[in-house]
Image (spheres, rainbow, N blue to C red):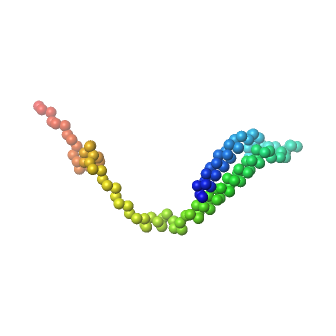
Amino acid sequence: MQNIVLIVHLILSLCLIGIVLMQRSEGGGLGIGGGGGGNSGRPPAGPLAKVTWIIAIGFIITSVSLLVISAREASTDSVIERVGTETQQAPAPAPASSPLGDSLLPPTASDAPATPPKPEE
């Protein structure tokens, strides 16, 4: 059920992005700089604006339904409470042998560096 709602949600989000990008810019985003004037009323909403509202309402409905579905499927304990109760997994088997040698780790501080031979006098 959650997968179906999620797919519908993604389709609605893509449609909402597309339909908002298709709309004509009216300038003065968020109503800034509209001015008073005699023609201060907004014109009636066109068909593209109505479709935008319908898709936006569908997007909100699918968002809320995804929230409800995920809350219903969630367990009652938190992640912190589950940390101590997880079963220990068996360690992964070590590889047989490496062609580069037994140890691939860098040398430790106790290992003496290789010194060049002393020149003959």
Quadrant position of the C terminus in the picture: top left
- For the question of whether residue 107 can be seen, the reply is no
- Seen in the picture, residue 67 relative to 115 is either above or below; the reply is below
- Seen in the picture, residue 100 relative to 60 is either above or below; the reply is above
Q: Position of residue 14 (x, y in %)?
A: 65, 46
Viewer-proximal residue among 20 and 66: 66
Q: Position of residue 34 (x, y in %)?
A: 79, 43
Q: Position of residue 88 (x, y in %)?
A: 38, 63
Q: Tell me what residue is drawn at x 30 percent, y 53 percent.
A: 94
- For the question of whether residue 81 can be seen, the reply is yes
Left or right: where 2 falls relative to 60: left
Quadrant position of the N terminus in the picture: bottom right
Quadrant in the picture for residue 38: top right
Name, please, the residue furthest toward the right: 38
Quadrant in the picture for residue 63: bottom right
Name, please, the residue furthest toward the top: 121
Q: Tell me what residue is drawn at x 74 percent, y 50 percent.
A: 53
Viewer-proximal residue among 91 and 110: 91
The tally of labels here is 0
Q: Position of residue 60 (x, y in %)?
A: 68, 55
- Seen in the picture, residue 74 relative to 99 is either above or below; the reply is below
Name, please, the residue furthest toward the left: 121
Left or right: where 20 falls relative to 44: left
Q: Tell me what residue is drawn at x 77 percent, y 43 percent.
A: 33
